[in-house]
Each structure stands twice: as C-alpha cells, then as structure tokens.
Image (cartoon, rainbow, N blue to C red):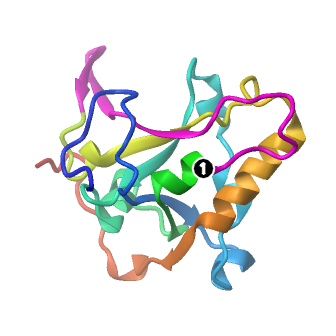
Amino acid sequence: MTANVPGADWESLPSEEWVARLAVASKDAESGKANPVAFELSSRDEAETRPRLSVWAKSITSYEQAWQLMGANQKYCFAFCLKPSDIRSIRPIPKEPLAEPLDVVWYPLFTSTNGEKFPDQRLGAQGHAGISGLKAGLIPNKAQRKSLRSQLADHARVIPLPVGEWKEVDANHST
C-alpha cells in the first residue's frame, strides 16, 4: 500500500511507500551509488527542535514536482529512492550506546503571508516527508551517525533526473 493521501505531521509513512531524496551530482551517484553525504542534516535542519531530513513520497510527488519545490536548481540531478521499511530496519554500528531508531514521517510544508503560516498548496507539496532520528543529540556518537548515513546510501536506488529537460514554473503555481 502506498500513501496517495498524506498523513498528519509526524505520522509514519506506509512501509511500502517509496521516498526520494534529491541530491547533487557526485562521482558516487554518476557510478550508480548514493553518496552518504546526501543524508546529512543541514544546519537549518539541525536547528529544528525535532529535525527531519527532507524526502518526497513518490505516490504523491513526482521527481519534477520535488525539483520544482526545491527551487528548480539544476544541481539536484539525482534522486536517491528508498522504502520506509528499509530505512526503519537500519541500526547504527556500533549498536551501543542505544540510539533512537530511524523513521519516515510526514513533514507538511507551509508558506507564510504577513506572518501567518498556511499549508503549501503548490503541486506535489503534500508529498513532503522526512527521515527522523538522524540528529546529533539523538545519535550518541559520530561513528553511529556516519554508519546510519552509509547504510541509507547503501539502500538507496540511484535515479538520474532529466533536469535539463524540465522548465522552472512560477513558484506561486498551485494545484
């Protein structure tokens, strides 16, 4: 079963759903392997109280829609695709000290107008989700964080994106 309809904030995605993380070109990606660096939280992500690494539910958001929502930047020319069931099965190495397990949860996007937040109505925005459990404070040591990113990369299917064929649409385009 795939999502088709997004869940509530922090609700887990169905295990059978495919999620995509858009990534920049690298030697690894060009040779068909995901680069673990693509699974690092940004400083902006880290600053959140409960950070999540952005991914997109494939049953709701196409690669092109995700690319548009991320600013139509030509550098995002690969999608690293994973199943939530695979993400949830990953355990850090070393196993001790205990760490919070990874999960894939809904992560609604919002826009702001005059200081008020509203759900993002752009095409594909409803498919935004996030991988939780990657924050430094939740993963006791650097070796464990590195092992989680490496395992995420190992599980990922690498899809080259035809971004040169896509055209940027008006950022205010909505469904």
Q: Nearer the viewer, residue 111 or 41?
A: 41
Label 1 SS: helix
Q: Is residue 59 above or below residue 135?
A: below
Tell me: 104 left or right of 46. left
- Residues rendered magenta in the picture: 90-119
Q: Assign the N terminus to one quadrant of the image.
A: bottom left
Q: Residue at x 34, y 47 (%)?
A: 14
What amino acid type should be assigned to the residue bearing mark 1?
Ser
Image location (x, y in percent) of residue 169 = 24, 61
Residue sitting farthest toward the top: 115
Q: Is residue 142 magenta?
A: no
Q: How many numbered marks does the figure carry?
A: 1
Q: Is residue 77 above or below residue 129?
A: below
Image location (x, y in percent) of residue 92 = 77, 44
Q: Nearer the viewer, residue 172 or 100?
A: 100
Image location (x, y in percent) of residue 133 = 62, 33
Residue placed under numbered mark 1 in the picture? 89
